[in-house]
Amino acid sequence: MGRHPLFVVARTPVVMRTRFELEMNKVGRYARARAGTPAGQPIWRSALPFHLPWVGKTGGGLMLLTILIALSLPVRAQATAGTLEWQPWSDAAFAEARAEHKFVLLDLEAVWCHWCHVMDDITYRDPIVMRLLKERYVLVRVDQDARPDISNRYQDYGWPATVVFAADGSEIVKRQGYIPPRPMSSMLQAIIDDPSPGPSVHPEAAFHAADEAAIRPAALARIKTEYEQQYDQEAAGWDFGHKYLESDSVEYALRLAGRGDATYGKRTSDTLHAATALLDPVWGGMYQYSVGGHWTEPHFEKLISIQAAALRNYSLAYAQTQNREDLVAAQSVFRYVTGFLRSEKDEAFYVSQDADLHDGEENEAYFKLNDAGRRAQGIPRVDTHLYARENGWMIAALCDYYAASGDVAALHEAQRAALWIEVHRALPGGGFRHDEVDVAGPYLGDTLAMGQALMALYNVSGDRADLKAAIAAADFIAAQFAPQAPGTGFVTSKTATDAAYRQHPDRDENIALVRFVSLLGFATGEERFHGMAAEAMRYLAADSVALRPLSAGVLLANEDFAEAPLHVTVVGSMASAEGAALYTAALRSITSHELIEVRDPGDPALPPTDVEFPHLGRAALFLCTARACSSPVFKAADVRGRIERAELTLAVR
């Protein structure tokens, strides 16, 4: 994910440290400055651990926490004369900085981000901050959802991210999260006094691609051990600190559970149950995450990436276990997305809904209201951009939900959104642009997400037009985003963000790419797609990439590359009741690594296959793994049990 996932989501979805931790990091730095920063060392260069050891403790720690908050948090700035003039990211901004001997400050924000609103309302209205910025800085503001290339570049810094550049494009400082006025003005002055790079900027380490696509056995064993250790035994869920539905981790655990691992069966069940605390009980949909190491302190923004990841996880879980709670959770997400994040006019999906009814103001009381109470106060802003990437994420998730639940409305929603994106966001050669007009790009994420969406549509509908479009998307990716050197990963954007920065790969995008083209290669028999997957796996198999947390995405990519999917084939006509029933039963038991196809003997244009299926005079279903095919299944009631047994036989390298 990513990512997502990631979606990351996704990409895996954007996950920061808690906003509380972000603020306490700034508070700690400011308190140290008040206590006496070493002579000659600017405040912004002082180094404290990100996790302050006393946060969350009682007694003296709580007293210190209270004092530090009182010392650091500013009073709302008084109205100031004039406003700051922001401009979009461009080469022109750096040209202006060179001509006027200024620095460039990038404010990388998100439309839905509460602390971005607070920083805009307080920090950037402070008179001292405004004076320094106007005198010595060219100001650039970017919505991270609108620029995937810049978002990927600074995703480790969360939102808001504050980056200061020299006029030549080299970085001077990178800061994560909300910065109050006094630390901000100190930082700005320190850069003016001494523009040499601070400790947040360091040379990029040399990258060494793996010699081959397969992950080394010792490294694979270590990744699996780390995945095991990433599970929160006390609170459930993967990762610590923030609690959120980490999509890849849940999906990999579902695979292990399907193979008979009872421990992971319980972990997925516990995690999915715990995550229902993040579902909005009034409007449906899932909040982004919860703070404090538990699931009951949500931050209320709702991103389409989060909805797509939740919809996929709960749908796959319901297909596997038939746990009613998982279906109800998936229905909650579907109800919210179609009610709040879908354009009635265009039938495509929006990006996000803000947590704040009024920018920067606390919102917990609002989300405790019922529907009438909320609507009486107003509805938080929705980002109504229609991005190809975000729509791709949601289309694919809707296909999973339709397959598992049988809700035909979900399939129709997915098909309509896909058609709109194909009409309004398509590029020559099979790719997709991000928005109606892109100032940069094209970006890998848009064509990749739509390729996965088209493949998902083919998997649940059998429409070969979707398969053809998925093939075109993969070919576009190969032509536009190929690694700059063997084994270095497919790059995020065809063009670099600026002259001082070369194109880079993104880990989550390469994970998604391996999974997409591996399945596509199996469905088509085209070796070139296996070659694309192998090229991306050489990047993912490098220790510097493979061993980074979180681990599940790499494990999923490695499996999808190394092992053929479970292949379910219905031989017979969908016009017959028996054939339709077998196909429906296969959909209801869908797994995360599976290809479902129909071979109608009366079809004159059947795609090629390596398996010779017998014609039995009646509809039959066959399940094939990389090693064997089943005997024919004639009764729909027997399909689930056969798929469960097939999963138990799957061996993983």
Image: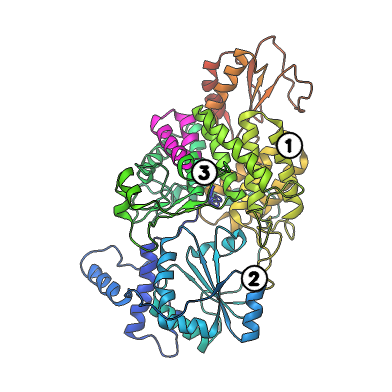
The percent coordinates of residue 468 (x first, y second) are: 73, 37
Camera-near label (2 vs 1) is 2
Tag 1's secondary structure? Answer: helix
Q: Which residue is mark 3?
A: 342
Apparent side of residue 483 relative to residue 57 in the rendered image (left or right): right
Residue shown at 45% from the left, 40% from the top: 333
Ranked by sequence position, the earlier of labels 2 and 3 is 2
Residue found at x 71% / y 56%? 487
Residue 582 image label: none
Q: Which residue type carries mark 3?
A: Arg
Coordinates of residue 120 in the picture (x, y in percent)? 44, 70
Left or right placement of residue 66 versus residue 507 in this view: left
Q: Disc 1 residue type?
A: Lys
Residue range in magenta is 312-337
Please identify the dominant SS of the magenta region.
Answer: helix
Report helix, strand or loop for mark 3.
Answer: loop
Q: Amino acid at mark 2?
A: Ser
Mark 2 or mark 1: name the one nearer the start of the chain: 2
- Pointer 1: residues within 10 angstroms few (<14), some, or many (20+)? some
Tag shown at residue 90: 2
